[in-house]
Image (cartoon, rainbow, N blue to C red):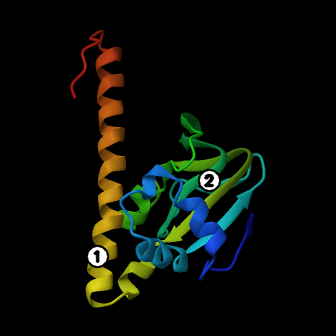
Amino acid sequence: MQETDFLRENQRVLNDIKKLTIFDPFQEEELRNLLTMSKIRRYNPGETIFEQGSADTWLYFLIYGKVRLMKDGKPVTLLQERGEVFGEMGAIACAPRSASAVAVGDTVCLSTDIYYIEQLSGNDKMAFGYVIYRVFTNVLADRLRQTTEELLSLKGRSIKIW
């Protein structure tokens, strides 16, 4: 893995991430705060981004490439859309990772250490925490919806719930 330093005042990266729909709820100042907690990480094909069972507070946004999520050594899903979020469960709960993430081909991620939200104070902490957790909520709701549809399909029912 190759990584940058924390991205303080990086206008080019700020302009690039503003194009990702996942960041639509953020104001520019909130995105600047996000960058101070973030690094750009590059992974080679087959390189592990994080391992099942490890624990940390890093959250990942896919910028380029593909990421395969693996549970107990078996493929679960392939992430390949710009802006897709992964690693949120471990980052939110500070619990051991429930799956591994492996780069498929050359992969670039915006990696955010949400531990630093706790270092903010007053309104900054409340406002930024609200926005990032709203993003988490949207991601988790989408994944629950997808999982429910897959479960119903496996049970032989093809109805849509939402």
Residue 122, quarter of the rendered image: bottom left
Quick one: SS at disc 1? helix
Say above or below: 14 vs 71. below
Q: Residue at x 54, y 56 (%)?
A: 61
Q: CA distance from mark 1 to mark 2?
A: 25 Å
Horizontal side, residue 9 vs residue 122: left or right: right
Q: In the orientation shown, which residue stands out farthest toward the top?
A: 156
Q: Amino acid at mark 2?
A: Ile
Q: Residue at x 62, y 58 (%)?
A: 109
Q: Residue at x 73, y 52 (%)?
A: 47
Say above or below: 136 vs 39. above
Label 2 CA crowd tier, 10 Å (few <14, some 14–19, many 20+): many
Q: Which mark is residue 127?
A: 1
Label 1 CA crowd tier, 10 Å (few <14, some 14–19, many 20+): few
Location of residue 28 in the rendering, given as x and y in whole percent from the top left corner: 45, 72
Q: Nearer the viewer, residue 43 or 71?
A: 43
User: Number of labelled discs?
Assistant: 2
Q: Which residue is mark 2?
A: 63
